[in-house]
């Protein structure tokens, strides 16, 4: 089968998308952000429920949120610990997921020159999440608490659409579950309702290709490893 031009473009955008962990300070046009979210909202959702809610942070609003979360990250309180509202990862890790998780972590730290015993350096690198890796745009996503598991599946397709629409415009992203730990700070700062649950955050901007962390390319299993064709 001969690939059509549109097929080649879609395949290229999907395969070139990756999580970027260092951004340039170059601003992103508000019209581009608006259009990316408009395109992404065409994601399918059960009975067209469209369960996504998005907070777009730039300028002072981005800086203020980052500073508050970074302060909590750098000065953890035993009396008032910050914990996630939902389990993004399994409570008990098993193979092969544990090995995959460890590999991507150590691959990133190796690029950054962080040895396993350098706990302080790893903590600081993790903290870069909360500065949105210096991206000029931070996105915070919430969902109404009444929505169930199916709506979270819909949400994932919406998030993927954002990342692909951004990539098609020469922009890069990093989806960030790291923010879920600080949902109380984020709710207070953004003043969203108790009926809303934080889903994740996302950095959006232009990749800094001079940074070594952006050379990381994660491995993927072959199709034969996760698919069974039945005839």
Image (spheres, rainbow, N blue to C red):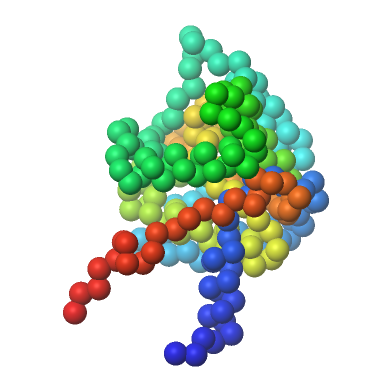
Q: Is residue 174 above or below residue 126?
A: below
On the rendered image, what quadrant is the N terminus found in?
Answer: bottom left
Q: Measured from the top left, where is residue 69 in percent x and y?
A: 62, 27
**Residue 63's quadrant in the figure?**
top right
Q: Tell me what residue is drawn at x 30 percent, y 33 percent.
A: 92
Q: Position of residue 22 (x, y in %)?
A: 69, 45
Q: Is residue 86 visible?
A: yes
Q: Residue furthest right?
A: 26
In the picture, measured across the screen, residue 179 lies left or right of residue 147, that is right
- Farthest left residue in view: 231
- For the question of whether residue 185 can be seen, the reply is no
User: Hey, which quadrant is residue 87 in on the image?
Assistant: top left
Near-viewer residue (182 or 206): 206
The residue under the point 52% across, 53% down is: 218
Quadrant position of residue 68:
top right
Q: Residue at x 38, y 64 (%)?
A: 222
Q: Give how far across and how far down residue 163 sits, in percent.
A: 58, 58
Q: Residue 108: x, y in percent? A: 57, 42
In the image as oriented, which residue stretches furthest toward the bottom?
A: 2
Q: Residue at x 64, y 67 (%)?
A: 168
* For residue 206, above or below residue 3: above
Give 189 or 28, whichever is nearer the viewer: 28
- Give left or right: position of 88 versus 172: left
- Number of numbered labels in the structure image: 0
Image quarter of the C terminus: bottom left
């Amino acid at each position: 089968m001969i690939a059509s031009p549109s097929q080649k473009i879609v395949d290229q955008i999907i395969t070139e998308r990756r999580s970027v962990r260092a951004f340039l300070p170059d601003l992103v046009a508000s019209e581009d952000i608006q259009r990316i979210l408009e395109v992404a909202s065409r994601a399918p959702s059960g009975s067209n429920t469209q369960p996504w809610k998005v907070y777009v942070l730039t300028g002072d609003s981005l800086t203020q949120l980052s500073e508050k979360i970074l302060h909590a990250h750098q000065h953890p309180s035993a009396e008032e610990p910050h914990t996630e509202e939902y389990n993004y990862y399994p409570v008990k890790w098993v193979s092969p997921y544990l090995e995959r998780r460890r590999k991507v972590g150590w691959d990133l730290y190796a690029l950054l020159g962080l040895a396993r015993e350098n706990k302080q350096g790893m903590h600081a690198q993790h903290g870069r999440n909360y500065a949105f890796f210096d991206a000029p745009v931070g996105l915070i996503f919430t969902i109404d608490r009444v929505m169930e598991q199916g709506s979270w599946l819909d949400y994932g397709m919406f998030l993927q659409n954002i990342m692909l629409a951004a990539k098609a415009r020469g922009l890069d992203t990093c989806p960030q579950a790291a923010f879920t730990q600080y949902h109380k700070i984020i709710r207070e700062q953004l003043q969203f309702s108790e009926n809303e649950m934080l889903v994740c955050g996302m950095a959006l901007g232009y990749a800094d290709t001079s940074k070594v962390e952006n050379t990381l390319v994660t491995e993927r299993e072959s199709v034969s490893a996760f698919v069974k064709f039945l005839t």
